[in-house]
Amino acid sequence: MLIIPLTGKLNKKNLPWITIIIILINCFVFFFLQSGDDKFEQEANTYYVKSGLREIEVNEYIKYKKGQNDVQQDIKQPEQTNPDSEIMKQYYLEMFRDRKFKSLLLSDQIITTADPQYKTWRDLRTQYDNILKQVFSMKYGFIPANHNLFTVFSHMFLHADFMHLLGNMIFLWLVGCILELGFGRITYIIVYLLGGVSAVELFSFFNIESTIPLIGASGAISGLMGAYAVAYGRTKINIFYSLGFYFGYIRVYAILLLPLWLAIEAFSLIYFKNSNVAYMAHIGGLAGGAFLGFLIIKIFRTDNHKVFEDAPDPKEAITPLLEKALQKIETLDMKGARPLLLEILAIDENHSIALKQLYNIDKLQPASDEFHKTARRRMLVLSREADSERALLDTYLEYCKLVDKPKIDPAMLLHLCHVFANSRKLDEAEKILDEVLLIAPNHPRLAPSILELAQLSAKRGEK
């Protein structure tokens, strides 16, 4: 089940730089600093099997499980068990997930100092651990049994694989952008880091003896989600939801997301007991973030609800602007109408009515640069519209008549020639070609235009 909040407030002038920087840091760590992890992990795994360490530890695990009456009593004696048998592989996977056994093993409570094989096992285990120490995620991931302040923060920037990174970065972008705009950059980064801390501390409390490193940004992102739900609790927001086979959009109060997210994580924690996903860390992040969100609205009051307001459609402003412009034109207030028309064209550069009115205003001063610019602009728009050949020709002829020296570049002239030729206005097309021959005889599009006009003339019998 997936529930994601949405906003449409992002733009080039208001980019979420902190979120972008966090994403870049995560990507840099994964693609560069963690790039050698696969090699060292493979080396460690190979050593673990070939050195006989796996056989020793799995056999001890079978004894451990027998002592708990969790295995069948007809299993062969550990020392007679084939290290490559299905039984060994089965219990190896179980042992790998059994955090309690691993904690007891590494604290010398499974293979004790009095055990004859203790020295052999300890030497092999030390060598194996030394290889694992070269794995970046092992070194800087958070290990509850070795609580370290630095790894409390560093684990937030490590990921197990590309899909783990991709999923977290997508959620960070979707949730982080909203909160960075809403909380402000300083508050946002504090919530991100402290949310990650609360996630790791709750996870550590329930897995105090675990030696498996916790890595990933999901705890910190959960902190952002908890803060989001509380800080904007009474705000109706748009969310995307997916039930696997069905998805859609809905508008709900933000506070409803918190119990939903907590319920999803709690269900996953209970149902997927053997999963490698740290659902308890997600719960810790959500709870810690919710508390931070409460502080933000009660003490700092830095939340900005404008990030959830529906962005108005710019084109909705065109009609009232056009009405004002036409009213000013009726009262001959051309100076007041012109900026309104320019504002319309800034929203819709091809708005034919506004462009026609602007052309009519500017042609009152044919010597002005504005008239040359507006005339060229109108001719370009008309040349792209269907059934506008007559208006295009009239505009061109009027423009040439009003100005002493037309300011149309050769490319635009040849474009007009093509439009006129195809609308069977061959005389006008020929005049334009004559003009281009004078001002730009070497233009690369001139020869094809002459050929086109010649072929069309031939079809009319004017060989």
Image: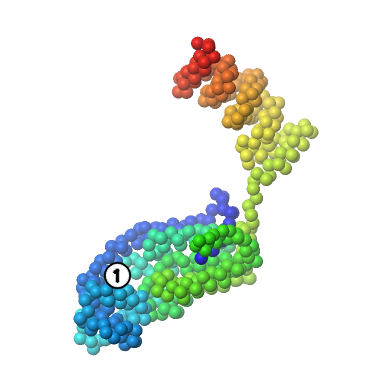
Q: Is residue 231 visible?
A: no
* Relative side of 376 to 128, left or right: right
Question: Vertically, is 317 above or below 243?
Answer: above
Tell me the kind of residue under disc 1. Leu
- In the rendered image, the vertical position of residue 339 relative to residue 218, given as above or below: above
- Of all residues, the one furthest to the right in this rendering is 331
- Vertical arrangement, residue 424 with respect to residue 147, above or below: above
Is 13 situated above or below 369?
below
Picture quarter containing residue 24? Answer: bottom left
Give how far across and how far down residue 275 sits, in percent: 41, 71
Colouring chosen for the image of the structure: rainbow
The residue tagged 1 is 132
Bin the neighbour count of mark 1 within 10 Å (Cα to Cα): few under 14, some 14-19, many 20 and up: many
In the image, residue 451 lies at what x, y percent?
Answer: 47, 18
Q: Residue at x 71, y 39 (%)?
A: 322
Q: Is residue 163 visible?
A: yes
